[in-house]
Amino acid sequence: MSSGLREDARFPGVSIHQSSYVDDPAEIGAGTVIWHFCHVLPGSVIGRNCSIGQNVMIGPRAVIGAGCKIQNNVSIYEGVILEDDVFCGPSCVFTNVVTPRAFVSRKAEFAPTRVGRGATIGANATIVCGHTIGAYAFVAAGAVVTRDVLDFALMAGVPALRKGWVSRAGEPLGRDLVCRREGRRYRETAAGGLEEVGP
């Protein structure tokens, strides 16, 4: 294969750059491409048709859904779950403990983080562990998420606050709550969230 990609008999239909390492045991779905200088640690699961950019570390025991795109210089630690079709921008950060100290072992205190289907995390954003990012949410570049994020929420700032709503296609929604790209319609719920109501 070109570009230094190779096939690994352990993972049929997967392309792995010759500079990357995948430790056993791991699961990787067909159609996934793992680029330069990556390391997949034991117990990790990566779905089908993912793109794993340069210098990405996954695991141990992290879970990546199908169709995810992880850009360069991202570490996906134990306890992080990315559902299908999540986009992680370059150098975004997931933490795994809330109060780290170099001289205090807190491996038993890793807090889980779940990123919902279709969500986007922008470049250099930080996701503090123990929170859930809702489906199709959009976390702006450089934002720091310190609380749970609603489905379809547009989050920005330090700490990140909701600045509006985005559609399933990632388009900011105006007052009419209609996606300019796809024409899908949305409505705010009594609980303060957003839901899709149809094309």
Image: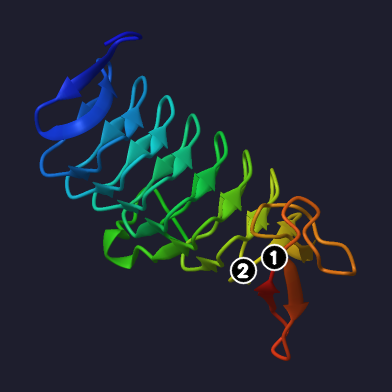
Which residue appears farthest toward the bottom when viewing the image?
Answer: 190
What is the total number of numbered labels drawn onto the structure image?
2
Q: Nearer the viewer, residue 107 or 77?
A: 77
Label 1: element kind: strand
> Which image quadrant for residue 114?
bottom left
Q: Residue at x 49, y 50 (%)?
A: 86
Q: Residue at x 56, y 67 (%)?
A: 134
Percent x, y for residue 6?
A: 22, 17
Crowding at dot 1, Cα within 10 Å, few <14 / some 14-19 / many 20+, comes out as many
| Kind of residue sitting beneath label 1 | Ala
Residue 149: assigned label? 2
Percent x, y for residue 21?
A: 22, 27
Q: Residue at x 23, y 48 (%)?
A: 44
Above or below, comparing residue 172 to residue 135 in the picture = above
Above or below, comparing residue 115 to residue 1 in the picture = below
Q: Residue at x 62, y 40 (%)?
A: 124
In the image, 67: left or right of 6? right
**Circles 1 and 2 in contact, beta carbons < 8 Å:** yes
In the image, 71: left or right of 141? left
Percent x, y for residue 72?
A: 49, 29
Q: Is residue 160 visible?
A: no
> Which image quadrant for residue 31?
top left
Q: Nearer the viewer, residue 6 or 60?
A: 6
| Kind of residue sitting beneath label 2 | Val
In front of the other: label 1 or label 2?
Answer: 1
Above or below, comparing residue 150 to residue 72 in the picture = below
Which residue appears farthest toward the right when viewing the image?
Answer: 175
The residue beneath circle 1 is 153
Quarter containing the N terminus:
top left
Q: Is residue 165 visible?
A: yes
Label 2: element kind: loop
